[in-house]
Amino acid sequence: MAVTVGAIAGALHAEKKRLDIVGILLLAVTLGMGGGIIRDLLLAQGTPVFLTTPLYLTLALVVGLIAFFFAATLSRANPLLIIFDVFGVGLFAMIGANKALLVGLDVLPAIFVGAAAGVGGGVMRDVLCGDVPVIMLPGRLNAVATVLGVGVFVALAEYTDLTAEAAAVFGVAFVAALRFLSAGLGWESPQPMGLDRRVRRWWRRRQSAPPGPTR
C-alpha cells in the first residue's frame, strides 16, 4: 500500500509540474520507495531492498504508467489519496524504526531512522523538483507527527510486552490522528520564537523605567 500510494502521489505531482513521462516515472519511483531507500542506506545492511525485490520497482513503474495515461481520473480521487498517503508515511516510518531496532540500534537512532524513512520520499521529490522540502516550511504537523508517532512505536516496542506489529498499529494511528487534527484545527509547526529579542526588549524597558518611590 505504501509503495502504491507513494508512486501515485509522485506521478500526480510530476503531472502538476508539467513533467514528461521520464519525470513522471522518476517521481513515481522516488516517492514510492524513497523512504525505504533512505532507511536501507542509513542502516548499511547491504543492497537496498527495492533492488533485491523486483516487485517493488515493477509496481512503482506500473503505477507511474497508469498515472501517465489516467492522470485526470486519479486527480479526482485526490482526497482519498491524501488519506492513504497519511497511512503510507506512517507505515514507512514504523517499518524503518522496527528494522533499526532489529539491527541493534538504540532508541534515539531508531526514531531518527524511522522518521527519515517516513518523510524521505517527500524530501527527495522536492529536491528533484527544485523546491524547498515541505517538511522544512511552516505548516501542518506532518514531520512532527511522524517523529512523535515513531517515538510512540519505539517506546511501546521496547518497553512494553506488545509485539512490533501491535506497536506499529498504535504508531501509525498516532501519526494519522495528529495529522488529521492539525489539518482540521489549523495546528502548525512552530517557527523561531525570537526569545533573545524579547529578553532584550524587556531588559531595555526595565532599564528605562522610572525608579519607584523611596522611603
Image (cartoon, helix red, strand yellow):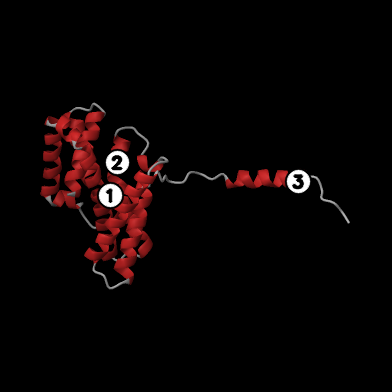
Q: Quadrant of residue 164?
A: bottom left
Contact check, label 2 and label 1, Cβ < 8 Å: yes
Q: CA distance from mark 3 to mark 1?
A: 53 Å
Label of residue 38 in the image: 1
Mark 1 crowdedness (10 Å alpha carbons): few <14, some 14-19, many ≥20: many
The quarter of the picture where the C terminus appears is bottom right
Q: Is residue 34 visible?
A: no
Q: CA distance from mark 3 to mark 2?
A: 51 Å
Comes first in the chain, label 3 or label 2: 2
Mark 2 crowdedness (10 Å alpha carbons): few <14, some 14-19, many ≥20: some
Task: Using the image as rendered, state which of residue 42 and residue 195 is in the foreground.
Answer: 195
Indicate left or right for 144 with 193 as reference.
Answer: left
Q: Amino acid at mark 2?
A: Met
Q: Residue at x 43, y 46 (%)?
A: 189
Task: Using the image as rendered, state which of residue 174 and residue 62 is in the foreground.
Answer: 174
Q: Amino acid at mark 3?
A: Gln
> Which residue is identified by label 3?
207
Above or below residue 5? Residue 45 is below
> Which residue is identified by label 2?
124
Q: Position of residue 80 (x, y in %)?
A: 21, 42
